[in-house]
Amino acid sequence: MTKKVQQLDRVIIRFAGDSGDGMQLTGDRFTQETAAFGNDLSTLPNFPAEIRAPAGTLPGVSSFQLHFADHDILTPGDAPNVLVAMNPAALKANLGDLPRGADLIVNTDEFTKRNLAKVGYTANPVEDASLGEYRVHALPLTSMTVTALAAFELSKKDAERAKNMFALGLLSWMYDRPTEGTVGFLERKFAKKPEIMKANIAAFQAGWSYGETTEAFSVQYEIKPAEHDPGLYRNITGNVALAYGLVAAGVQSGLPLYLGSYPITPASDILHELSKHKRFGVRTFQAEDEIAAVGAALGASFGGSLGITTTSGPGLALKSETIGLAVATELPLLVIDVQRAGPSTGLPTKTEQADLLQAMHGRNGEAPVPVIAPRSPSDCFDAALEAARIAVTYRTPVILLSDGYLANGSEPWKLPDVADLPTIEPGFAEAGQEDFQPFKRDPETLARPWAIPGTPGLEHRIGGLEKADGSGNISYDPANHDLMTRLRQAKVDGIAADIAPLEVDDPSGEAKVLVLGWGGTFGAISAGVRRVRREGGQVAQAHLRHLNPFPANLAEVLRSYDKVVVPEINLGQLALLLRGRFLVDVIGYNQVRGLPFKAEELQNVIQDVIDSE
Amino acid sequence: MSDEAINGVNGLNGNGGRSALSLVPKTDQKQTMKDFKTDQEVRWCPGCGDYAVLAAVQSFLPELGLRRENITFVSGIGCSSRFPYYMNTYGFHSIHGRAPAIATGLATSRPDLSVWVVTGDGDALSIGGNHLIHALRRNVNLKILLFNNRIYGLTKGQYSPTSEVGKITKSTPMGSLDSPFNPLSLAIGAEGTFVARTIDSDRKHLQSVLREAAQHEGTALVEIYQNCNIFNDNAFEPLKDPSVRDDVTIRLEHGEPIVFGAERQKALVRNPAGSFEVANVADVDPSRIAVHDASNPDPSQAFALSRLDSPAFEHTPIGIFRNVDRPSYDELLRGQVDEAVGAQGQGDLAALLASGDTWRID
């Protein structure tokens, strides 16, 4: 039959199911197909901390949201246009986010009396009138998959497990996605299990054919590719981009990378990724704990490697003392904190921006550390390179604050030309110096020499005890301690002269309200700002990459606007720093739900402030 | 330097003839003890056992013939951890308990260095216990000198994890309650490949142990009984008092029967339960006298020897308890990097970035 083709400019799909249903894989494959097709996109995986919560329960629901469009988009979308619910728990957990009129695809095979009861449904919502405001597609996805795979020598369980590929095939047909990538992926993934491979491909194709032939779906949608700058693109998550940025920092500095890490959600994927790249001379060391991880990284830095440690908030807390040692010994060290919701164990798989003050101040003594934050998944690449540049140039630990949303979220990335990447100069101290002074500073950067073991004539001792200016010998002299404390602070403060000034996006030049954010909220804030402007509102936007030191022009920017709104996924940490530093009464907007901001909520927040002018 | 020094006196540092120092550059300059002294004033208490260890190390190192700049001392926190400041090599005085972790990063990234860790009973066994056992099981190329004085010195006299039960200290006025660690039993249990004990006051023995430790491929743990004359004076007196020391000190020699005593009248025999007991040489069939085999892969004999230590020093073995071959973590890690480069060539950054699904927009 010939189907009607309807043009759309953007769609938000959410795949939801049990943790064991393969929703992350399904979402990831749909994303890859969509990226290959040329749409702009943004993704939001959302999964429980438990590996396999009891099947069919609300805590076990895993989802993957994908926003794709024929134009430049900034967020994974506020509310899905399409929800695929693989079981009653997935329906119940996600229905609240679904706007009236949305498409709802439910796997009716899983809507058994027992599964309904597990999540507190007394009646089957698919059969009563309770889903009346949605376009419900009630499909027996599991049994259709099993039927489609009847010819394969598979157990019923294995056949049922391919239902996510059937769903993917159906959605791929609905939105006319290219399928070669997924077929190739399944061929590689199951290369050693040919029967499973063929079955999954067959399920995927059966899903597509079902969409094409059934009358249940009368419309196929078309979302044209987005306009992108010319270039070579790939889709990338924040954690992979960060790992690539670190590899690039090694290449661009000529320093061997040494990663000391202890597995922790949501940072472990950086360890996994870097451990694959030993051919770049990368050494990865899975330590016995967070403290050993950062200790080994610092020890490697002492020896002339680029020492890196990756962690999340609880691990950063454990590393505090060693970061302080890196401050005292003035050695390069990269500390990557992929923030998650806290305090304590908190919500390990959910995002938050609440480690800013820990990064700024979470050490004993006066221990200033540069802090930088990426703004999008692909920006993690550039942020990692920038963090490495500062660490090596200024002989200092640097904390990079990513977050769970950036880490697991993905977007298309235009690959940089490797020839254009900045070079980083290690500038090791050279042999043959008379009366070597390990704490004699470069007059411009205030950085001390990096004299690595093996360099004849520069033998010296460093440590956590206060050192005499210049010689680095232990010193308990009061005036020397005051001087050294101020020198370490001045060194970090001085980086402000070596970073880009804060750019303000203020198209009309007449805005009275500035929205200032940092880190992973960039997409949502930009989308909110865009909506305000589309409706005629005037608002300026700026986004901080450098949290310590702040860009040199920040004071001037803050004072150029009547009101400054600071949205953060914490209870006002940047706001506290801004008020303390600049005496500017910023207006905080704060949510800590473990989820990114929505464009609409920020639109309303910004509009309210404009209206109150 | 003699070939003997390179290869290990007892030829125990097999590993296919490889020594921990095979990749560390040698000097052709003659070195003396003075070359390893710094201009910093040594600030231990007068009479501290640490002075003797420092002198023993400084006078031993020239024997290795290594370039001075390729030797690094890493320490934690505590009295003994001031050691690196007095060694004219590279040095890192780090954080309480963390020296093995920091040294692991250094040693596993720099095969051309001889990396030494100086630590104490509080540093290594209390706050840093985790790092110590993991360094041992990994067999990282570290030479760990554990100064055991059975007391906290720098914090002024609290009991330590090696203090005997019932120790009266400032923090335990009614006596300490916790059972002590036996550092060597712990190290053997943690899969240590080189485990030894020596005494601060016996320079000759201390240096003989250091000589073997330096060459050992992997982690060498050397416990040094060290006297704190301020807070725990005479803790090891039976092992030092000329009138009794020979009767209580069992000097372990690889390949030799374990006999001791002023007249070499006592011997160790293994009882059916696997532990050692002391017998009079005159009373036992010579074939029952245990022969020390430090190279035995089975750790049970070394462990049984380690259990002979007791707070009262009725009979205390010193020397090398265990010295077995196992590839070091450093070497294995290097091997993986070399294997990856060998199989795939040096990494190409542009190719890495473009790996996976890509698309071009013209």
Image (spheres, coloured by chain):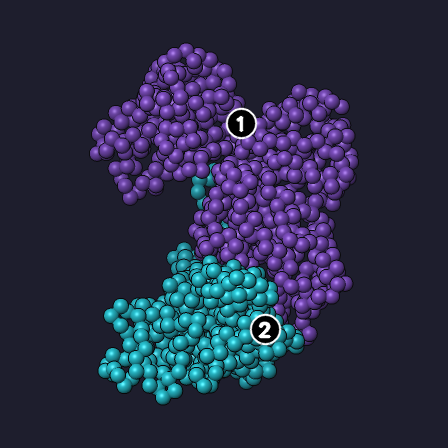
Chain colours: A purple, B cyan
Q: Nearer the viewer, residue A339 or B238?
A: B238
Q: Is residue B27 left or right of residue B257?
A: right
Badge 1: chain ID: A
- Quadrant location of the C terminus of chain A in the rendered image: top right
Does dot 1 land on a helix, a strand or a loop? loop
Badge 2: chain ID: B
Marking on residue B230 = 2
Q: Nearer the viewer, residue A517 or A167?
A: A517
Which corner quadrant of the image does residue B48 belong to?
bottom right
- Most extreme residue toward the front, as rendered? B174
Name above or below for residue A243 compared with residue A34: below
Q: Is residue B269 left or right of residue B120?
A: left
Residue at (25, 79) in percent of width and height: B288
- Name the residue tied to disc 1: A77
Q: Percent x, y for residue B339? A: 39, 59
- Most extreme residue toward the bottom, as rendered? B263
Amino acid type for the residue under numbered disc 1: Gly
Tell me if mark 1 has few (under 14), some (14-19) or many (20+) residues whose alpha carbon lies within 10 angstroms of its own. Answer: many
Residue at (39, 62) in percent of width and height: B190
- Quadrant location of the N terminus of chain A in the rendered image: top left
Residue at (70, 28) in percent of width and height: A539
Comparing labels 2 and 1, the label whose residue is closer to the camera: 2
Q: Is residue B184 left or right of residue B102?
A: left
Marking on residue B14 = none
Amino acid type for the residue under numbered disc 2: Ile
Q: Percent x, y for residue B253? A: 36, 80
Q: Percent x, y for residue A367? A: 66, 53
Name above or below for residue B36 compared with residue A194: below
Which corner quadrant of the image does residue B8 belong to?
bottom left
Q: Are marks 2 and 1 in contact (CB under 8 Å)?
A: no
